[in-house]
Structure formats: C-alpha cells, structure tokens
Image: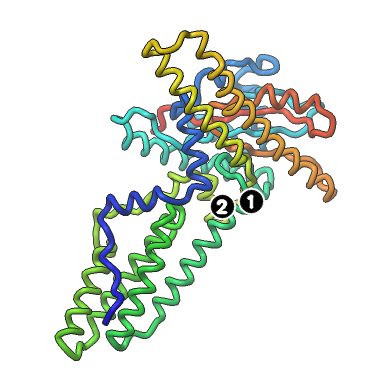
Amino acid sequence: MKGLVSIPEEDAGREAGAKRTGVSRRALLTFAAGAVGNTFFPKAATNERPPEGVLSAEEVAATIERVTGMPFSEFSKRFDGRVRIASPRGGTYILRIHQMHQPAQDAGRKISGQSEVVAAQRTTEKLLEAVIRANKLDGIFAEGFAEKDAAQRYRDAVRSLEGQLAELEKRSIGTTADAEKAYAGFERVYTASLNNPIFFHYTMRDIRALAHTLRNRFAALVPKSAEERAWLATFDLKLGAYGAERADLEIPDPYTEGADLKLFMDGKLKHIYPMEDRAANARAIKAAQAYRQARKDLGAGRIRREELEPYWREYREAAFTQRERIAFEKVGEWDRERARAGKRPENIVLFFGGDQDFTDTVRQQNKTAGHTERGLIELWAKRPLP
C-alpha cells in the first residue's frame, strides 16, 4: 500500500509552520508591535496631553459611564480612562481602547511577557463586551485588519475544517484501506489547521479527539497479514505523533491573537472593521527598517545626528501620521454608509496599539466638513495585571 504520509515533524517544525502563514492579521500586528521604540504597555507619552478641560477622577468616571453606558467603576481597578476631547454639543464619542498584543522586547521576559499579553487580553475582553453590549454595537474597528471580510474568512475557514473533522469522525473504517484513507484525510485537515495560528487555536482540540478516535478504530481492525499489521502500527505511531496523547504539546491560547478576534470567533461580535492598508503598512515597515538602521549607523559613528532627522521624519509620517489618516478614512467611509442607510451616528470603538495618539486627528476631523463630530475617550489596562 503506497502513499503513506510521513510522521509530522516535532515542535520546532510545528512552530515554523504556525509562523509561516496567517500573515493577513499577524503581520500587521507584528509590525505595529515591532515599531522603533515600541513597548508592551502604552507609552507614558501617549497619555501626557491634557484633556479638554481638567476633570477630577470622579468626573472622568462619571463621563465614561454616561457616554459608554457601561459600569466603568467596575473596571476602574484594572483600567484607567481619560476624556481626551469632549464631544461637541454632547454628541457621540470615539472610545479608543488600547490594544496590547506583544510582550516586552526583552528576550529574558519573552515567556512571562506573553503571559502578560494573555492576561491583558482576557481583561480587555470583558471591557469590550461591556462597551459593545451597552452601546448595542454591531462591530468595532481594530488594528491588524486590512479587509472588511478578513475576520469572516477566518471564521469560515475554521467552520470548514470543523466540518471536515466531523465527517471524518463519522467515516466507517472496516479495512486497512479505509484506515489509510481516513488517516490521509486527517493529515490534510491537521496540516491546514497547523498552517494558520487562528485555525490551530480553534480546531486542535477536535483534532486531538479525532486522533484518539481513529487510533481506537484502527486498533479494533483485524489485520489479514503481517504487512497490514505493520501498516496499522505505522498509522498508530503517526497519530500519536500528532499529539493526541501528548501532555507536553500545548494548544496556543486564542487570546494571543487578540480579544477582538476571540469575541468574533465566539459569536459575540458581528463585525470587525479594518483600520489598516497593506500598501501603507509596507511603506511604514520599510521606513521603520531604514530608521532603525540609521540609528545603528549613528551609534557606530557612520552618520552625524543631523543626518538622522530625515529618517525620523519619514518614519513618523509612514508609521504614525499615515496610519492614523487611513484609520479615520475607513471610519469616515463607515459613517457615510450609515448615513446613506438613514442610521444615526453612534459611539464607535477603536481597538488599537498604545503608541498612536489620535487626539490631533480627531480634532482635525471635527473641523472637516462631511465628518461626524465626536469626542475622544481613551481606556487602557493598568499595570501590572494581577
């Protein structure tokens, strides 16, 4: 019997496969997290600009509760908030919630940093749920998405894989030939799941369960020859290598991909609206790399300090100013679509990394004809998280 696929590679191969794909969201978040000088927590500089009028902590909390409809006092132990811009004429607000998707860049804190990411995302999920529920929002705008249907494609792909796993679980296995076909189908689904971190998160438990089921069914077969007995033993060995019974093969935590996508995949959020543009991000990545190299050249004495300035200006324009402009262009398109449908303006949620400061952009938008005037409230997780 021919065509048996090889035993899957060990964990190093699995990790390489997981990182190889899933670039539509992961690459954008990786760029955002890897920007020059970025850190895990929102920078202090992000919160240095004073709000539109000095408010006490009680006034801030009361404003946030009134605007968002959520019981902010319940979250105040874990989150800080600031009213950056009061809404003109008591209108709607942009609720900017800081996204924290990357551990500290210190290699020594890589593992503990990742646990911080998961803890922050779990806490932020509760905050997002409260805001979405209180404002009856169909969706939020989130960093890491460049197309309107990106999140839906993830969900559809996972559902397809889950359907294939269900069909394989129902398959009758009465012969060694049946076992080979079932194993080949199993290996295809496993590989497709492994090649994307999102898929891997949501299908791996079912894959492990199916591997266990197939092993039991294969063990129940009565081989007709020593050759068939050897084939079945090989199948059993391969299924075991997929981690069906390996306690050391940890399923990646879905929160590492973000609370927003977790809510969407769980059916608690209808839409995730894009805030990114691939071509613009490619330019930003190139500018960030050039600036990073220029800093190294300055440190090595290859360039003078004044020669660093053009790299800095280009990096700021591409990685910050341009990205903010694109994000709000997408918000404006969404506003106009709602207006054409006869829908009233509503509060919107931006789930974005801590380095971007949208204050000037919101002020400018409020002065521009054809744009909905909004206030700006920022919410971010305190540190350290318990």
Image coordinates of residue 256 in percent, x first then y, are 43, 44
Which image quadrant for residue 168?
Answer: bottom left
Q: Is residue 354 left or right of residue 239?
A: right
- Residue lying at the far front of the rendered structure: 302
The answer for how far apart the CA atoms under marks 2 and 1 are is: 7 Å
Question: Tag on residue 271?
Answer: 1
**Callout 1: helix, strand or loop?**
strand
Q: Residues within 10 Å of mark 2 (few under 14, many from 20)?
A: some
How far from the left and from the top, in percent, is residue 194? 39, 58
Q: Nearer the viewer, residue 81 or 321?
A: 321
Residue at position x 21%, y 69% in the image: 237
Answer whether labels 2 and 1 touch (C-beta < 8 Å).
yes
Quick check: 233 above or below 265?
A: below
Other-residue count near label 1 (Cα within 10 Å), few / some / many at <14 / 14–19 / ≥20:
many
Q: Report if residue 71 is visible in the image.
A: no
Amino acid at the residue labelled 1: His
In the picture, which quadrant includes the C terminus?
Answer: top left
Give the residue at x 69% y 25%: 361
Identify which residue is drawn at 14% across, 85% down.
226
Residue 86's label in the rendered image is none
Q: Identify whether 192 is placed above or below 376.
A: below
Label 2, on which residue?
A: 264
Residue 216 % position (x, y)? 26, 77
Camera-side residue: 347 or 44? 44
Q: Secondary structure at mark 2?
A: helix
At x 61% / y 36%, what residue is drawn? 280
Quadrant hosting residue 144? top right
Residue type beneath disc 2: Phe
